[in-house]
Amino acid sequence: MSARELVVLGTASQVPTRHRNHNGYLLRWDGEGILFDPGEGTQRQMLRAGVAAHDLNRICVTHFHGDHSLGLPGVIQGINLNRVPHSVTAHYPRSGQRFFDRLRYASAYHESVEIIEAPVDRDGDLVVTPAYTLRTHKLSHPVEAYGYRLVEPDGRRMLPERLAAHGIEGPDVGRIQREGVLGDVTLDDVSEPRYGQRFAFVMDTRLCDGVYALAEGCDMLVIESTFQDEDAELAEDSGHLTAGQAGRVAHEAGVRHLVLTHFSQRYSEPEVCERQARAAGFEGELTLAHDLQTVPVPKRR
């Protein structure tokens, strides 16, 4: 199986710091690359992280605040400058079409690659491919925002010892997979469920139903933790989550690997976010994201 991993390009919230670039996250998924929320400086961060324009197949923008979208001009022009040999699809809130248009054509350049605009205006499936379904749910932020969820289809894992016990080999293995039965042997007799992996990306939002819908049962949840718990009122007023809230969501949703990011520059010790997420009940694997880090998606359950 090809790599499934998150490449972290930037982890700051509204104001970048000396050590944290504006947002940017690339999900590598079996040879396909999905770029989430390219903030200012993303093109340079891609270079530093070894991510090429050719690696991009989709761009997913949660909303049109600058720290989540000001990198679009450079990324899109880089795709064209490098003559990427495939089309690239862009998802973003339909209500922000005017912002996307301005960012896409922020300066003069020659368009050599097809950018497919596929805006979002409701919850549900955006794309269904053999490898995954990309879904979206609306979030709660001062401007319209959507989170994204990638779900791999469930399948079956063939068990060699059971196949051998029933004398099934060669072309008959494919036949029982396709037809579900071979003589008096069923597919259940020689295989077991293989549950598809799940990934979610949740940025700027208050707690809402969409957050939980996106996070449910995820192998990896990338989620903002802009504020620490002592500033919960400020988080609510500005449409953000605290680290404790992110940890509680991950705990209640059964997340396996929690990636906290989008840290406010007001805090000098992001380790506090991990302690607060743990205190909220989350016991799984936890990563405090930092720029240019690569985080593998957990292996199948």
Image (cartoon, helix red, strand yellow):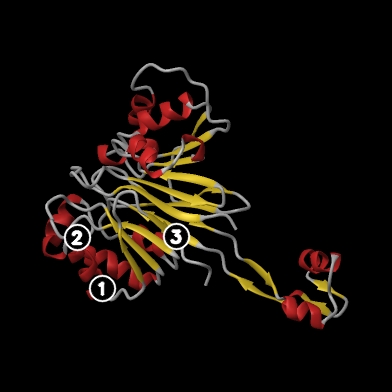
Residue 189, image x and y in percent?
Answer: 75, 80
> Label 3 to label 1, Cα distance in Å?
21 Å
Residue at (52% x, 72% y) in the render: 301
Query: Residue under circle 2?
Result: 270
Q: Position of residue 94 (x, y in %)?
A: 40, 37
**Image spot of residue 249 (x, y percent):** 32, 67
The residue located at (21%, 61%) in the rendering is: 242
The residue depicted at 28 percent of the width and 70 percent of the height is: 248
Chain-order first, disc 3 or disc 1: 1
For disc 2, the neighbor class at 10 Å (few under 14, some 14 to 19, many from 20) is: many
**Mark 3 nearby-residue class (10 Å; few <14, some 14–19, many ≥20):** some
Identify the element where label 2 is drawn. loop
Q: Is residue 32 toward the left or the right of residue 169 in the image? A: left
Residue hosting label 1: 278
Quarter of the rendering containing residue 296:
bottom left
Whole-angstrom CA distance, mark 3 to mark 2, is: 21 Å
**Residue 168 visible, this orientation:** yes
Measure the alpha-carbon separation of dots 2 and 1: 13 Å
- Element on which disc 1 rests: helix
Q: Amino acid at mark 1?
A: Arg
**N-terminal-most mark, 3 or 2:** 2
Which of the pair 230/283 is nearer the observer? 283
Of circles 2 and 1, the one toward us is 2
Mark closer to the observer (3, 1): 3
Secondary structure beneath dot 3 equals strand
Q: Amino acid at mark 3?
A: Pro
Q: Which mark is residue 296?
A: 3
Q: Amino acid at mark 2?
A: Pro
- Quarter assignment of residue 21: top left
Question: In which quadrant is the N terminus drawn?
Answer: bottom right
